[in-house]
Image (cartoon, rainbow, N blue to C red):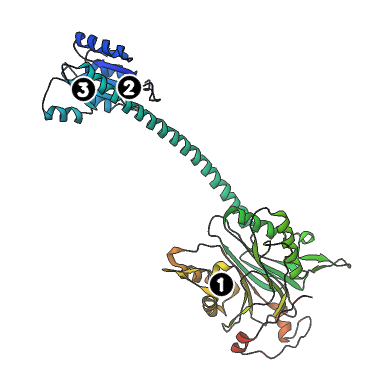
Amino acid sequence: MQQADEGGAGARRILVVDDSATQRLLLSAHLKGWGFEVSEAANGDEALEALRSDLPDLVLTDWMMPGLDGPGLCRAIRSLPGDAYIYILLLTSRTGSSAVSDGLASGADDFLMKPVNPVELKARLASGTRVVAMERRLLQQKRETEAALSELQKLYRAFEADLAAAAALQRAQLPPAHAEVNGCEIGTFCRFAGHVGGDHVGFFPIGEDAIGLFSIDVSGHGVAASLLAIRLAQYFAPRDPENNIALTRWPDGTLGARPPREVLAELNERCHTSLEHDIYFTMAYAIVELESGRVELCQAGHSPAAILSPDGTVRFCEAGGGPPVGLFDGAQFESGELKLHPGERLILYSDGIVEAQAAGHPERMLGAEGFRALLRPLGEEPVTALLPRLSAAIEDYAGENGLDDDVSALVFELRGAAAAEMTGEPGTRRQRHTAPQRTASEQEQAPLQSAGRR
């Protein structure tokens, strides 16, 4: 079926339907004189057949005709497939409000009494032409909108596929949820607010006597944050020690650890000079000496590390700090020290935990004390269960509103030979003497000393 003109300005094709040849001749003469392109039909059935192959812009039809009458033709036109609009002007000698009501109810747009006044007919057709032009413009806009929407949907599906691939790539970079390294136990979890996120945690062995631990929280969310998080994690790749930014090769050929403050200073320099946008990150990086339990730590704008004792005592380490990494050139960072005792767990985590909003009270955040309260019952939990239980507790706190920020954490516990050496148990590589154990309250109140610059 040929569609009616969609431009509006060319809405000049009209079909005249009347069983009187004389009436058709008179009407057609006027219409052609006014610039219309006219076609004719002797009754409603003939008109409907013509409409099935070629749609005019307007139809001028008599009411009373043999077979399909004017109102029947109106109803048939309105039921035709397609979305092009045809303006219908119904002619009749019937008078009274019921005639007008019946005609309009059948689908006619306008109503004109017979005998037809040419001046009035011309005015009615001018009005109809304007309506058709408007309808054609709206139809064109609708089709353009639908085409644009279809393209957007294609782009969205492609974006979703790319985002899923990015999410799979990022998750492949994450460490396992549980691992044993050099006789120590490590647990990790990372939950993104979207498909991808800016949080990352990880660890790597430093020879046989130390382990490096890190927690990264890139500003913002989404793809840009996730790309930087992946890039940063690759600087600490455990399977590529030669290119690990935290390691250095000593003259005797062995690999050793660079001080945390130096590592963060180099990251700051690399990110500040290579990134052209305002993305920065906070980070906690720690080196744990397995024989002594000594921890050297640098926390660049990051949430303070937590130490969880078996009795549920929680203390936070404020030692070792600096500004977020990549925020400005020439930033200075300090290293601090703490000591892990047997059974204690070191926990590095992103601020998505302490900034979790309470269910039903978005103005109230979990905060450090709330985090402490969640950790206390977990003092004797095995590492394999500690973080899953902590994650569930945080989600319960947030409730149905959920978490609107990435959330990640890493927990480290000295075990095996390392813990045995600290307690002086026999059968270890070297017997070590430790200071008497402090009480829970003493542990919680004891200050953690800063190592400062070395």
Camera-near label (1 vs 3) is 3
Q: Is residue 379 left or right of residue 232?
A: left
The N terminus, quarter of image: top left
Helix, strand or loop at disc 1?
helix
- Amino acid type at circle 3 is Leu
In the picture, the disc for residue 235 is none
Rendered location of residue 307, percent (x, y): 62, 78
How packed is label 3: few (under 14 Cα within 10 Å), some, or many (20 or more)? many
The numbered dot on residue 57 is: 2
Badge 1 crowding class, 10 Å Cα cut-off, few under 14, some 14 to 19, many 20 or more, is few
Residue depicted at x 73% and y 56%:
273
Mark 3 to mark 2: distance in Å?
A: 15 Å
- Which is nearer the eye, 367 or 138? 138
Q: Up-down: is 376 above or below 217? A: below
Q: Residues within 10 Å of mark 2 (few under 14, many from 20)?
A: many
Identify residue type, mark 1. Ala
- In the rendered image, the vertical position of residue 93 relative to residue 331, given as above or below: above
Compared to residue 190, the image places residue 298 above or below, namely below
Gap in Å between the C-alphas at discs 1 and 3? 80 Å
Q: Please provide percent x and percent y for residue 324.
A: 66, 66
Q: Considering the numbered disc 3 on the image, is that residue within a helix, a strand or a loop?
A: strand
Which residue lies at the image location 81% right of the left edge and 65% below the top edge? 248
- Residue drawn at x 31%, y 28% is 131
Snapshot quadrant of residue 337: bottom right
The residue pinned by badge 1 equals 385
Does residue 249 appear left or right of residue 111 in this picture?
A: right
Which mark, residue 90? 3
